[in-house]
Amino acid sequence: MPRSAQNLFLALQFADASTLPELLRGMNRVPAMLADRSSNGDPPMCSSCTAPVKPRLDTDVRFLLNRWTPFSLLAQMATSPQLPARLHREMLLTAWARAALLHRYGLAEKLAPALAAAAPSLRSSLSAFQSARTPPAQHFAAALTFLLFPGMNPYFLSRTPYFTNVSPPIDKLEVSPGWEVNASNWWGVVGSKCTTAENPQGRGPSAWPLSFPWPLPDHQAMVWSSFGYQAYHPIFALLYSRGGPEPPPLLTSAQVAQAKQEWLQLTSLPPAQNLLASEVLGWVRAHPTDPRDPHALWLAAAATGKYMAEGPDQTTPQIHEQALHMLKTRYPDSTWAQTRLP
């Protein structure tokens, strides 16, 4: 059976899953083809598109994980041995990010060992997070982790920008890929807003149109899994005729209600660079002798400075100036005070 047909059957199973193993089996799909944005259905020409194809999260799967999956179930899914390594890693990254932003630190600590094993470059940051023993210290450790790894995101996105190596620490003079001005960095950074009744600020994947058809992936490597351009296959049009995936039978009404509450919490967060930089400023004011302060302030200034021109919030330049001023005046002799911003 062609891989594309297999994926369609898996999608049908996913939509009707009544047990967790069925749900996980239905989301484990290998793209039928990868193509760059210029292929338009022709055989892929880019070298990266001909690399061995590994499982990816399809459009309907991402929609359900973002919109209808409560964090307790997401954490359970992320640690399931039923997932292949690539999906296991992506699920852990997103689950930990969501736990940290929702201040579910107990669950974040439980996920940390598995995430450190799946993404070794995060090990040092996760160890610092696990060593934090007060809520402010946990807030700061989590914010510092996000700043160091801008590919981390509480949402499952259509693009796959940094899941191969997560993202290198931003501690070099040159501008690294993690600091390109695009919506792949954290969440709610750039891009037009599309507000809905459930997301009045128009942030996160809720800015996707919730009516069919769904948007096309906008990263260089398009995913052609069960159907040409993502959700345009007729079977998907029939399966999700009401505008998008609905909660599968597996989810109880209580779980759906919890997922809705968590969704509203996530989509109400301030833009990433403002939230993370503000956490850093608050920590430095209260703990001026912490040896991590100069580096954290540099990261905060770099994150906000990159988005002053295109940022979604007028407070971004103010936060940038505060971080830069604090770095230059409080730690003038530090290496980071002398390091050029990207």
Image (cartoon, grey):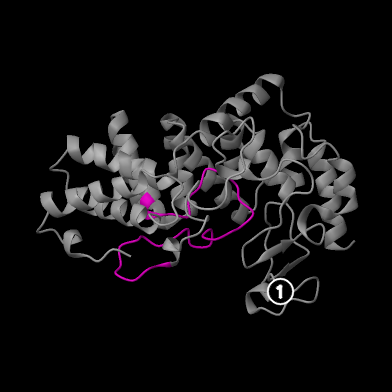
Where residue 179 sits, quadrant-wise, is bottom left
Q: What is the count of numbered marks? A: 1
Q: Is residue 189 left or right of residue 48?
A: left
**Which percent across, then down, holds residue 295?**
24, 54
**Which percent across, then down, holds residue 323?**
24, 48
The answer to whether 264 is drawn above or below residue 276 in the figure is above
Where residue 43 sits, quadrant-wise, is bottom right
Q: Which amino acid does the dot numbered 1 rest on?
A: Ser
- Magenta part of the protein: which range? 147-176
**Which percent across, then down, holds residue 79?**
57, 41
Q: Main secondary structure of the magenta part?
A: loop
Residue under label 1? 38
Q: Is residue 12 left or right of residue 219?
A: right
Whether residue 81 is visible here, answered yes or no, is: no
Whether residue 267 is visible here, answered yes or no, is: yes
Q: Is residue 70 left or right of residue 34?
A: left
Does the magenta run of residues contain 201? no
